[in-house]
Amino acid sequence: MEKPTICEIKEIITESPSTKTYILDRKFKFKPGQFAMLWLPGVDEKPFGYSSNKGFTIAKVGRFTEAMHNLKEGDLLGVRGPYGTSFEVLGERILAIAGGIGVVPIITAVEKFSKKGFEITTILGARCREELLFVDRFKRYGNLLPCTDDGSFGYPGFTTDRLEELLRGDSKFDLIITCGPEIMMKKVVDIANRYNIPVQVSLERYMKCGIGICGQCALDGEGLCVCKDGPVFWGDKLRYISEFGRYRRDGSGSRVLI
Ligand SMILES: Cc1cc2nc3c(=O)[nH]c(=O)nc-3n(C[C@H](O)[C@H](O)[C@H](O)COP(=O)(O)OP(=O)(O)OC[C@H]3O[C@@H](n4cnc5c(N)ncnc54)[C@H](O)[C@@H]3O)c2cc1C
Ligand code: FES
């Protein structure tokens, strides 16, 4: 197994009340949707998407991410990767749908695909205005449709309601890409299927090795591993993933309902 590269944190940017970006002392090569395993000695090693070629953006949700949020500029962390599959393009007009911290792989895809000449619209959702991430970056690279659950900014409601509204109108898209809470992605896939639009989703599962050895992230159905066969899956693969939108497994392998 590849050894982690030890990196120094050059800058920490507070993006929102729950989220920080860590700019490291080197440039990373990756494809949008791929991830790295970040290692804090004595704490754990966990998967995170690249939010740019300079680092990672992390929401505080538990033990590891809290330890990340306690780090200071000048502190060190281990990075190994990139791993996994990435978003691919199709047609000319792409609709991106990002919810919460799922914004991370979506912003890098939007930036890359827009520079290649694809026409991009992004539906960006968060609980409230303060938690909407990378608004300026999204605006620079296409049409942005923000949504907040509490109605404090943009469309008042869920990304999937905005999606239905958009598709009922004149807008036509050749491809949908999405990352966010699984319950949201399940609805996005159902809607995409109804409108016959190809869709790619970025799945999140508990990981240990990150390279297809331990089996922790294997999905019920055909046993696809999120770390190796994903995290980005085409919609037609999802019919072989019986747990999609229903449950996931925690670190002990027990089912947790979604
Ligand atoms: C491919 C991939 C890319 C990711 N990219 C990012 C990223 O860019 N930024 C970011 O902030 N996070 C990202 N994550 C999620 C990140 O790995 C987890 O938030 C982190 O492992 C949580 O660790 P913790 O010890 O802080 O929390 P834990 O103590 O492990 O858990 C805290 C809470 O989150 C829940 N939880 C833990 N793991 C999962 C999971 N896999 N799915 C759903 N709920 C879970 C737990 O049930 C608990 O309620 C990514 C995950 C994957 C698989
Ligand atoms: S995390 Fe070990 S097989 Fe995927």
Image (cartoon, grey):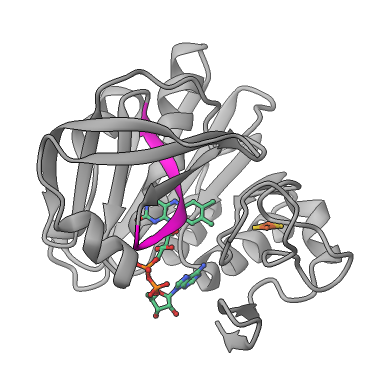
| Most foreground residue, 22 or 214 | 214
Q: How many marks?
A: 0
Residue 146 appears anywhere in the view = no
Ligand 1 image-quadrant field: bottom left
Q: Is residue 229 left or right of residue 150?
A: right
Q: Is residue 78 left or right of residue 197?
A: left
Q: Position of residue 135 (x, y in %)?
A: 22, 40
| Most foreground residue, 90 or 84 | 84
Kindly identify the residue that appears in the image at 31 percent across and 71 percent down: 63
Q: Position of residue 70 (x, y in %)?
A: 14, 58
| Rendered position, 7 above or below 20 | above
56 magenta-colored: no
Q: Is residue 153 left or right of residue 200?
A: left
Q: Is residue 48 left or right of residue 91?
A: left
- Boundaries of the magenta span: 42-52
| Rendered position, 228 above or below 250 | above
Q: Position of residue 258 (x, y in %)?
A: 55, 82
Quarter occupied by the N terminus: top right
51 magenta-colored: yes
Residue 134 appears anywhere in the view = yes
User: In the image as oriented, which residue stretches furthest toward the right?
Assistant: 222
| Most foreground residue, 148 or 25 | 25
| Rendered position, 175 above or below 155 | above
| Most foreground residue, 242 or 225 | 225
Q: Position of residue 109 (x, y in %)?
A: 48, 31
Name the chief secondary structure element in magenta. Answer: strand
Kindly identify the residue that appears in the image at 74 percent across and 51 percent down: 212
Q: Quadrant of residue 242?
A: bottom right
Kindly identify the residue that appears in the image at 68 percent across and 67 percent down: 216
